[in-house]
Amino acid sequence: MMPVFITGANGFVGRSVLRALAAARIPDIRLLLREPDELAATYRDEPGWQFIRGRLETPQQRFHLHLDRFRRDLDAA
């Protein structure tokens, strides 16, 4: 299965999506979050889930590095 990239996971809809993904045991999830600490603690036991601190409105070098790694993962899949 290809990795899944999610933004807005802290929101009302995003939290519901995360619960469904966790219940289905979907691996290889990348989550872009402004404040990932709470969700990272909640879902820390999910295999392959990565919590990336960042924002789409103001790209940062750290975000770009993670996005480049995500793209390489997709190319390899």
Image (tube, helix red, strand yellow):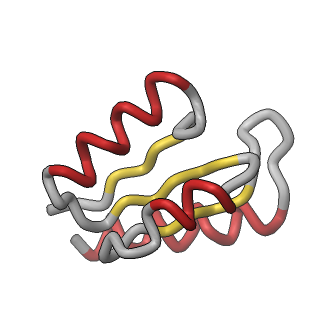
In this figure, what is the number of numbered marks?
Answer: 0
Determine which quarter of the picture holds residue 2. Answer: bottom left
Horizontally, is 20 left or right of 24 in the view?
A: right
Q: Is residue 16 above or below residue 26?
A: above
Q: Position of residue 3 (x, y in %)?
A: 30, 60
Would you place residue 69 above or below residue 23 in this image?
below
Question: Where is residue 28 shown, x and y percent of the image?
Answer: 31, 66
- The image position of residue 70, as x and y in percent, is 47, 66
Residue 74: % across, % down: 33, 64
Residue lying at 57% horizontally and 28% vertically, measured from the top left: 11
Q: Nearer the viewer, residue 2 or 29?
A: 29
Q: In front: 18, or 63?
A: 18
54 vs 25, left or right, is right
Picture quarter containing residue 37?
bottom right
Which residue is at 46% across, 32% downward?
14
Image quarter of residue 17: top left
Which residue occupies 34% across, 52% down? 4
Q: Residue drawn at (51%, 53%), measured in percent from left and top?
A: 31
Q: Quadrant of the N terminus?
A: bottom left
The residue closer to the viewer here, 53 or 68, is: 53
Which quadrant: the C terminus?
bottom left
